[in-house]
Amino acid sequence: MIDFMQDVRVAFNEPGLPFILAGPGMKGFKSQWGGKDAICEAQKKATERPEFNESTAYVESRHFAPKSVQHNKYASCAGRVARAAALLT
């Protein structure tokens, strides 16, 4: 993700281009695939690097994993992403 953000900033000649990274939250914190936790942590740490910490944000989305097909809170996650975007502007 770090390389991607750097490459996009160079390609568009925008050194401070903001990014919002959201942890993949489709199965919540109880995902059976253990690698997702490592991905979430790596994405969060990327936003904390000195070259990114003023222009990137990490949004935790695992809190909004649906409890069932009928109970979907992804709209709440979209709201968190919008609030994070507002902080970066």
Image (cartoon, rainbow, N blue to C red):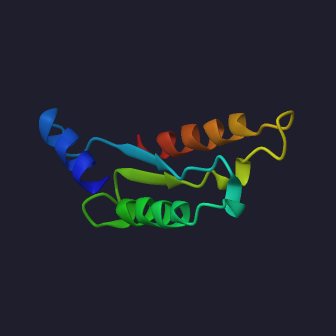
* Residue lying farthest to the front in this orientation: 32
* Residue situated in front as seen by the camera: 15 or 3: 3
The foreground one among 46 and 70 is: 70
**Residue 37 against residue 10 in the figure, above or below:** below
20 relative position to 49: left or right: right
Q: Is residue 26 left or right of residue 55?
A: right
Give percent across and percent down for residue 57: 45, 52
Q: Residue at x 48, y 46 (%)?
A: 87
Which residue is at a point 34% across and 43% down the rendered structure image? 18
Instruction: Name the foreground residue: 26 vs 79.
Output: 26
Quadrant placement of the C terminus: top left
User: Residue 28: horizontal and vertical position, in percent?
Assistant: 69, 55
Give the answer, above or below, for where 60 lies relative to 14.
below
User: Horizontal placement of 65 versus 16: left or right?
Assistant: right
Query: Which is more toward the observer, 72 or 77?
Result: 72
Q: How many marks?
A: 0
In the image, is residue 83 above or below residue 39?
Answer: above
Question: Where does the image place residue 71, in percent across and percent down from the top left?
Answer: 85, 38
At x 48% / y 67%, what residue is drawn? 38
The percent coordinates of residue 42 (x first, y second) are: 41, 64
Q: Residue at x 65, y 42 (%)?
A: 77
